[in-house]
Amino acid sequence: MKSGNLLTLTLGALLLAGIPISSAAVTPNSNIRLPTDGGDEWPSPPWDCCDKLKQSPLRIWPPKYKCLDEVDHCAAACEDCKRADGGGYVCRDWYWGVNPGPKCTGGGGEEAVRSRPWKCCDDAVCTRSMPPTCSCQDKVRSCSGGCGKCVQVESQPPRFRCLDRYHGFPGPKCHNQPA
């Protein structure tokens, strides 16, 4: 009986305050965006690739990143490019998103994407870090050319697994591609 009295008092207070009860339930101009509204892709980071990635100590989602790499010139998307002590430049922008991009292992971002040791992976095991470090547990007919350590895991028919680890997202799934 007490909950009925509380409901009556709440509705009475809304009416006395001049708030129509129907508008409390439905708001036509909501600023909440749903994934179906479009724009659900994350923006790209303001650098092509990064080896010295710093994550913000704040526990927020999505996380914030800053690239501390010293480069000859900042990427075009960088808004806060500062001259570093070593003579190069550092992009001081913070990137707020889920994928801060690949490492610069040996060159630009394009080359780092190609350095993934497998073409595709259905059974990826990744750390929870951002970006993650992944390994692929798929058993395949033969390892791709980018794999450094390929071991045979079954003999009849022969199946192999690439034991390399990759710092970045595991890439596309193979389920629609021949292994």
Image (cartoon, rainbow, N blue to C red):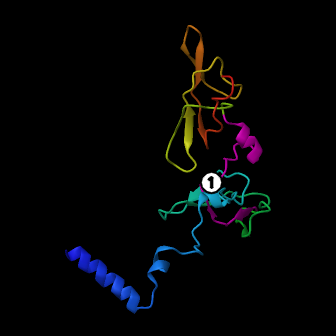
Quadrant in which residue 146 is drawn: top right
Region in magenta: 88-116
Quadrant in which residue 17 is drawn: bottom left
> Residue 127 placed where, x, y %?
50, 43
Judge left or right: residue 4 versus residue 132.
left
Q: So how many labels did they put on this image?
A: 1
Q: Nearer the viewer, residue 10 or 43?
A: 10
Q: Residue at x 24, y 80 (%)?
A: 5
Residue flagged by tag 1: what amino acid is it? Lys
Answer yes or no: is residue 67 visible: no
Judge left or right: residue 2 versus residue 114.
left
Judge left or right: residue 85 versus residue 60.
right
> Residue 111 placed where, x, y %?
75, 41
Q: Nearer the viewer, residue 131 or 9?
A: 9
> Residue 101 placed where, x, y %?
67, 51
Element on which disc 1 rests = loop
Q: Residue at x 73, y 37 (%)?
A: 114
Q: Residue at x 65, y 50 (%)?
A: 51
Give the residue at the far top of this rendering: 156
The residue tagged 1 is: 52
Q: Is residue 166 above or below residue 128?
A: above
Queried whether the magenta region covers residue 105, the answer comes back as: yes
Report crowding for label 1: few under 14, some 14 to 19, many 20 or more residues within 10 A (C-alpha).
few
